[in-house]
Amino acid sequence: MAADLDALVREVDERLDAGADPGRAEHGEGYHATSMRIRGVPTPVLRSIAGDLARRLKMEADITIELASRLVGSGGFDERTLGYILLSRHRAARTSLDGDRIEALGEGMDNWASVDAYCSLVAGPAWLAGRLEDARVKRWARSPDRWWRRAALVSTTALNKKRALGGRGDAARTLALCERLAADRDDMVEKAVSWALRTLAARDPSAVRGFLDVHEEVLAARVLREVRHKLETGRKNPRRA
């Protein structure tokens, strides 16, 4: 028998309420300012709930996608994060998503934490697997919305993780987006350019050095400083991307 979606939503709401931490919620309101409701549920609790749901819904990809979509669209920060984690844990649901559904799951993002979770757990892996079109990510990079521009850049980190593409990374797609946004002085975009380049630097340092040389006059000083630190020491800058 198919799972009752409304019952699942009610269950999730109760479990999130039980895990809510007012102190953590107050911290989150300053750390990643958002118009979304924040309950302050710790990440390990979200992962535990997602893992349980993914096991129970193992054979129900459509229900899982619909549940994740409802969580993302609920107006809650914790619900949105849970939806992304759930999709990352459910292979059948994850591999059923097309470009339109993936993009819809990003609608309403208004803070860096949600953008980064979306890209790390949903959009980036889908792009790596060929389920998200290059043209769509390029369109994000042209968006007037700072959060979609950040999403384009953060999605490249999935292409350049240690095991991605046999460990070689993807300099071509990464650098094309970094070039597009090299002169963008929005703080959230600048930080994402740095993150994208630093992640690629671990896979293809020569490509990153060449990019810095060519675009030195355009890139923000912070980006140059942080990426050179990564190239010289192999360690990421202590400041968050």
Image (tube, helix red, strand yellow):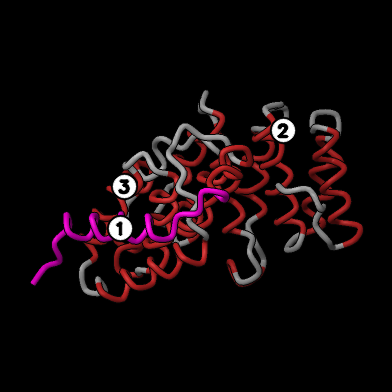
Task: Give neighbour class at mark 3: few <14, some 14-19, many 20+ (Cα, 10 Å).
Answer: few
- 5 left or right, relative to 241: left
Numbered tag placed on residue 166 in the rendering: none
- Counting residues from the start of the chain, the first of labels 2 and 1 encountered is 1
Give the residue type at disc 1.
Glu
Residue for point 56% across, 50% down: 24
- Residue tagged by mark 3? 101
SS of the residue under disc 1: helix
- Counting residues from the start of the chain, the first of labels 3 and 2 encountered is 3
Give the residue type at disc 3.
Arg
- Residue tagged by mark 1? 14
- How far across and how far down the image is residue 144, in percent? 52, 23
Badge nearest the viewer, 3 or 2:
3
- How far across and how far down the image is residue 3, in percent? 15, 66
Residue for point 24% across, 65% down: 61
SS of the residue under disc 3: helix
- Closer to the camera in the image, 59 or 114: 114
Q: Is residue 6 magenta?
A: yes
Q: Farthest residue in the left direction?
A: 1
Badge nearest the viewer, 2 or 1:
1
Numbered tag placed on residue 182 in the rendering: 2
Q: CA distance from mark 2 to mark 1?
A: 44 Å
- How far across and how far down the image is residue 23, in percent? 57, 49
What's drawn in magenta, residue-wise? 1-24
Q: Quadrant of the N terminus?
A: bottom left
